[in-house]
Amino acid sequence: MTSILVTNDDGVHSAGLLRLAEVLEALGEVTVVAPDREKSASSHALTLHRPVRIRGFEARRFMVDGTPSDCVYLGALQVLERKPDLVVSGINHGSNIGDDVTYSGTIAAAFEGTILGIPSFAISLAGADMSDFTAAAMVAELIAGKILADRLPRDTLLNVNVPADEIKGLRCTRQGRRIYDETVHRGVDPRGNEYYWIGSGEVPHMDQGPDTDYMAVREGFVSVTPLHLDLTHYESLELMSRDWGADLESSLLRLTSRSI
Ligand code: MN
């Protein structure tokens, strides 16, 4: 039987995860292994320096006092008897577009699945209104079915964002760029100590390229962005090996020969 591991970064009781687990039951046996609390923006952290606890609370439902990546790692290698056929992370409460990709715990969980050799995707509901996950759950089921039937290219995961308003269609997109407002709020706590708050809470500006994840969602389309595990930028590799690399190497060799 097809085995599907479901996780998220919003916590095991969040509405998006419950809806996702429910809808994927149509495709196989779903096991939820998710953080016991909100772990958004935890990126790809693994807990290595303290013990991690797994607590089962219903049939095939487990909470972990760790990160989304811990959940996928432990879910695939400990909770389940064999690696699952698919890892699905979400449905995140809020979009994961542009540079969010590098901060997102939701997407990191899908990266972790990919590292373990399991087809994986992340799915997020993009918008302010988080009251209705119906459409996003339907998209999740569709994409899960497609991946189980057709697989994914090697070392590749999908980052899916579903607009919260009416859906006009689906676009395959590239990752956009966030234009940061670079805000730090400084305050003083009741005990007279300074604290800092990162970000303004305002909606960030985005690179408005027509082929980006951001534009797809803004125009009412489901955005599907393939992401690759190998972060090497191959164009730059060529350029760097040609120019930089030779320069750096000759300087290095001068320094090392002098120090001998
Ligand atoms: Mn989240």
Image: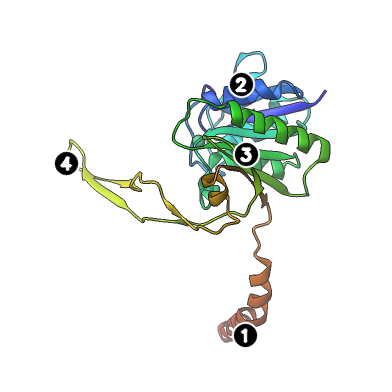
Give residue 192's mark.
4
Q: Earlier in the sequence, mark 3 or mark 1?
A: 3
Which amino acid, mark 2?
Phe
Which residue lies under the disc numbered 3? 122
Q: Identify the residue shown where x is 51% and y is 41%.
A: 95
The single residue placed furthest to the top in the displayed view is: 58
Q: Give the secondary structure at mark 3.
A: strand
> Are the residues flagged by discs 4 and 3 in contact, CB closer than 8 Å?
no
User: Could you say where residue 66 lies in the image, as x and y percent from the top left?
Assistant: 54, 32
User: Could you say where residue 198 lies in the image, as x and y percent from the top left?
Assistant: 35, 48
Q: CA distance from mark 3 to mark 2?
A: 19 Å
Indicate which label's residue lies in the foreground, 4 or 3. 3
Which residue lies under the disc numbered 1? 250
Q: Give the secondary structure at mark 4.
A: loop
Q: Earlier in the sequence, mark 4 or mark 1?
A: 4
Which amino acid, mark 4?
Gly
Ligand 1 contact, mark 2 (Cβ < 8 Å): no
Indicate which label's residue lies in the foreground, 3 or 2. 3
Which amino acid, mark 1?
Ser
> Are the residues flagged by discs 4 and 1 in contact, CB closer than 8 Å?
no
Q: CA distance from mark 4 to mark 2?
A: 41 Å
User: Could you say where residue 164 lies in the image, as x and y percent from the top left?
Assistant: 52, 34
Ligand 1 contact, mark 4 (Cβ < 8 Å): no
Horizontal side of residue 69 vs 143, given as left or right: left
Indicate which label's residue lies in the foreground, 4 or 2. 2
Which amino acid, mark 3?
Ala
Horizontal side of residue 87 vs 8, given as left or right: right
Which one is in front, 239 or 217?
217
Mark 2 crowdedness (10 Å alpha carbons): few <14, some 14-19, many ≥20: many
